[in-house]
Image (cartoon, rainbow, N blue to C red):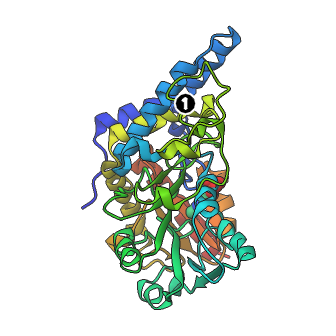
Amino acid sequence: MSKLLPTEQGRRIAAQFPRMKKRAFFNSASLGPWPKSAHAALKKHISLWDKTIDATTEVFDAWREIKSELGRMINAPPEQIGFAFNTSHGISIAAGGVKLAAGDEIILSEVEFPANTYPWTNLRHKGVIVNFIPAPNRCFDLDIFRRSITPRTRLLAISFVQYFNGFRNDLEELGKICREHGLFFMVDGIQGVGTVPLDVQKCQIDFLACGAQKWLLSPVGSGFFYIAPHTRPEVEANFAGWFGIDWKADWTYLLRHDLLPEKTADRFNLSAVPYLQILAMRNSIKLVNSLGVENIHQHNLALLDQLIDYLHDHKYYRIASDLSPAHRSSILSIACPEALRLQKYLQERNIITSFREDLLRISAHFFNTPSHMQNLINSLEMFFKRIAAR
Ligand SMILES: Cc1ncc(COP(=O)(O)O)c(C=O)c1O
């Protein structure tokens, strides 16, 4: 049985998201709200800057703290985590650097979000073959994947959670298959990290790319990537930013043009991390970790269970997400004949969802409450009655 977060946590969360009192915001799969602590950090930084006070040291301390918090979240050492402006930036580091030759094959799913397709199809100009495999019922199928692997297959790129129906891929099993066949295993984490537990080592992930603007409740322009230690030599840096060089913490004498790159994920640094993003992100990531991703996952499932109970056997609505426990996430999608009109109808009632691939997508996060969910259910029923009365 899934469990809601305890009431005292609920109070703490409500204080961080005061605007959620009047708003049923079920759209973290698009862009997540920032907690009050992140707003406050931004305001403080702007006021320091107004007084021309240099906050560089604080920013780099914050970045170190974020790395260790993220490391805790995904079970990775901090030195294997690097900053990325978004998921696409991380994926592009992998796609631009992984060693692939003409005739090598990459496997993608036909239902993959474009951030995780274009960086790979872009490699066609090198003669790399991109194989989009079919997804029956719009879900990734392990047997089709196994059958699609050929002696030339080198890489699988896949989402942790599918953006439009919330299908959670079995990363542990995929990791095993990739290892057996010597495939590079690249994961787009953005729809799962921070809301569904992930252990990158257990899943044998080679490279994880993740924007922080959705479930990690941080500004657009913030995110991270993880690169496994054995993978680092396999991914070349096709650029060399001066922050990717091992200065041995001495930035006073810079006219040394023969230094070597960093040995950690920092090798992929271009320049300084963006100050505002980092300061906001620190507070959001700490809040997520302080609640615990497993507890958040359980809370979100419990809220969605409330919705599932209502939708079960409904005359008008059909659940379009896979409900088997191993494939559930914090996204649940609904099919109905007028889903776009429904999404607008809900928005007019201050219930925020999204419309993706013909489905109404509901994203539940830890600041959502059973009364938000009841509000959504009541509005779904009113919409249905209107349609039925026509
Ligand atoms: C699976 C997935 N990947 C990536 C993105 C976004 O990529 P980026 O962070 O580069 O904007 C989204 C949503 O916008 C997504 O759903």
Q: Which residue is the site of mark 1?
A: 247
Residue drawn 61% across and 83% down? 131
Where does the image place residue 186, in percent across and percent down from the top left?
A: 50, 65
Left or right: 1, with 123 as reference point: left
Q: Quick check: can you spot residue 65? A: yes
Q: The C terminus lies in which quarter of the figure?
A: bottom right
State whether residue 274 is above or below residue 173: above
Q: The N terminus lies in which quarter of the figure?
A: bottom left
Amino acid marked by disc 1: Trp
Total marks shown come to 1
Left or right: 297, with 20 as reference point: left
Ligand 1 lies in quarter: bottom right
Where does the image place residue 47, in percent across and percent down from the top left?
A: 65, 14
Q: Tell me if mark 1 has few (under 14), some (14-19) or many (20+) residues whose alpha carbon lies within 10 angstroms of its own.
A: some
Which residue is more in the foreground, 123 or 108? Answer: 123
Which residue is more in the foreground, 126 or 385? Answer: 126
Judged from this view, the residue extending furthest toward the right is 125
Where does the image place residue 240, in percent across and percent down from the top left?
A: 65, 45
Left or right: 299, with 273 as reference point: left
Judged from this view, the residue extending furthest toward the front is 258
State whether residue 203 is above or below residue 239: below
Residue drawn 65% across and 70% down? 120
Residue drawn 67% across and 49% down? 239
Query: Can you tell which quarter of the image residue 122 is in?
Result: bottom right
Mark 1 beta carbon near ligand 1 (under 8 Å)? no
Which residue is more in the foreground, 348 or 59? Answer: 59
State whether residue 27 is above or below residue 168: above
Where does the image place residue 188, in percent across and percent down from the top left?
A: 53, 61
